[in-house]
Amino acid sequence: QVQLVESGGGLVQAGGSLRLSCAASGSIFRFNAMGWYRQAPGKQRELVAGITRGDSTNYADSVKDRFTISRDNAKNTVYLQMNSLKPEDTAVYYCNARMSGMTIMNDYWGQGTQVTVSS
């Protein structure tokens, strides 16, 4: 059973910073990739940032140069450092872990953590 537990969300003023953490039960090295998604009210869930087992990263255009995803394999944790936050970054942020093979693909999700950016 895979469990992902997010933490670090909260209320911050525009221009501020937050760091989200996603702690996994067991080694994160078993996942092909991990990422952060977000969902604002009335909008679809969207990918914010992803990181592969080989440490390749990708970001949504809206967060490039402001957000940084990283991983600590020893702590089984993935982080999302968010700087220069904007009101439009307000959303519930979800941690995702993907495990895939030749014939299967499994996605695992955390419960989400609220990020609210005030103007």
Image (tube, grey):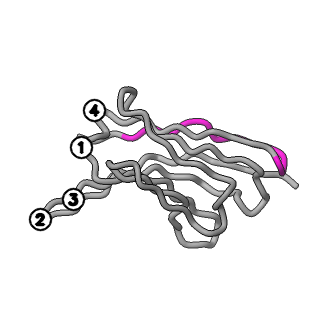
Residue at disc 3, secondary structure: strand
Please name the predominant secondary structure of the magenta segment in the image.
strand
Sequence-earlier tag: 4 or 3? 4
Look at mark 3 in the image and give the residue it sits on. Answer: 100
> Disc 4 marks which amino acid?
Gly
Q: Is residue 66 left or right of residue 94?
A: right
Q: Which residue is mark 2?
A: 102
Quadrant of the image containing the C terminus: bottom right
The residue drawn where x is 42% and y is 52% is 51
Q: Residues within 10 Å of mark 2 (few under 14, many from 20)?
A: few
Q: State which region is magenta.
A: 4-15
Dividing the picture into quadrants, the one containing residue 91 is bottom right
How far separated are the C-alphas under marks 2 and 3? 7 Å
* Contact flag, marks 4 and 1 (Cβ < 8 Å): yes
Q: Which label belongs to residue 26?
A: 4
Amino acid type for the residue under numbered disc 2: Met
Q: Secondary structure at mark 4?
A: loop
| Total residue callouts | 4
Indicate whether residue 11 is drawn in magenta: yes
* Kind of residue at disc 3: Ser
Front-most of residues 29 and 97:
29
Please tell me whether residue 79 is drawn above or below residue 99 in the rendered image: above
The numbered mark, 3 or 1, whose residue comes first in the sequence reads 1
User: What secondary structure is found at the residue carrying circle 2?
Assistant: loop
Where is mark 1, residue-wise?
Answer: 30
| Mark 4 vs mark 3, CA separation in Å | 17 Å
